[in-house]
Image (cartoon, rainbow, N blue to C red):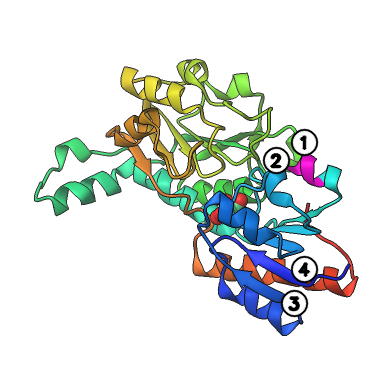
Amino acid sequence: MKLDSVLISDAVDPACAQLLRENGIQVTQKTKMPLEELLDEIKKHDGLIVRSDTQVTKQVMGNLKVIGMAGTGVDNIDLAAATKKGIIVMNTPGANSISACELTCALILDLARHVSPANSALKHGVWERQSYTGTELYGKTLAVLGLGRIGRQVAKRMQAFGMKTISFDSMISSEAAREFYVEKMELEQIWPLADYITVHMPLIPQTKDLINFDVLNKCKKGICVVNVGRGGIVNEEGLLKSLESGQCGGAALDVFTEEPPRSEGLLRLLAHPKVLATPHLGANTTEAQKRVAVQIAGQFIALNKGSSLSGV
Ligand code: MLT
């Protein structure tokens, strides 16, 4: 397939554009475009590279031949529409897994030891020790929902803190899970055992609202939830209700159903004192961004040269 021109519509590392240009492909990089401008711009290109910000709807696809995700999750791309239009969709699975894993671990530690709220209080002049008394991770149970590239690495690292790791993953056998020292269980078995739940699954109909008010009620009082996966796997309304009732003991959220969050319900959730929130930073490290940029550019160049395809 011959590619003439590629639009990069999100903040992808400049290495991507540079590599494409060095290989004779024209590149335009324009981010944060209003829809009208994007629709106008897309007409000039046969390739599009995005991260999770651009919503690649059927309308946006125009006459594209290929869409590249400089990352893993492709829920912002209408795959059914792309398939119907014969558009190739590629991603870079694995290139940012370690970064997503490390942020997850940082958030679990932060929930346990209140690093962020204590830091914020001290910077506002409040020297407060008692209310920031934490809990040890040692001996606690971490439920890793989704034992793919990221989930496995999270389990491995948190085991070093003495956490027991249990998991649900319909794609993985108990034997395979055991290789990572993780015990595979059904969801209903997991709820009453977990002290922390972290989700590492794609957002698909089967995982939407997986963690909701009723599920949280089946967990131990004080259950902590981490979502560095995708907004929507944890039902935000149910989570807020559970936090307000005291059943949920804390939540760390990097992803939201609306990014950036603007709705009243989401702003209330963010404002809850037991919520730690970061602006979709899972893949935001220098290393991961360079890796995804180089990898997706390489895939486009290979496609342009007529070699093999990889990704979705
Ligand atoms: C991913 O799915 O790899 C990330 O969410 C992409 C991003 O950081 O935008």
Query: Which span is picked out in magenta?
Result: 77-82
Please tell me which of labels 4 and 1 falls first in the chain. Answer: 1
Q: Which mark is first along the chain, 4 or 2?
A: 2
Pointer 1 residue: 173
Residue sitting at x 61%, y 47%: 55
Q: Which mark is residue 300?
A: 4
Q: Which residue is mark 3?
A: 25
Lower sequence index among marks 2 and 3: 3
> Could you tell me which secondary element the residue under label 4 belongs to?
helix
Query: How far is mark 4 from mark 3, CA to CA?
Result: 9 Å
The reply to whether the C-beta atoms of the residues labelled 2 and 4 are less than 8 Å apart is no
Q: Nearer the viewer, residue 199 or 284?
A: 284
Q: Are marks 4 and 1 in contact (CB under 8 Å)?
A: no
| 7 relative position to 155: left or right | right
Q: Amino acid at mark 2?
A: Ala
User: Where does the image place residue 255, in percent across and percent down from the top left?
Assistant: 49, 43
Going from N to C along the chain, the mark reached first, 4 or 3, is 3
Q: Label 2, label 3: how many angstroms apart (C-alpha)?
A: 43 Å
Q: CA distance from mark 2 to mark 4?
A: 34 Å
User: Alpha carbon of mark 3 to alpha carbon of mark 1: how far?
Assistant: 44 Å
Mark 2: secondary structure: helix
Dot 1 amino acid type = Ser
Question: Left or right of 3: which side holds 253?
Answer: left
- Residue 177's tag is 2
* Majority SS type along the magenta span: helix
| Residue located 17% across and 46% down the image | 121
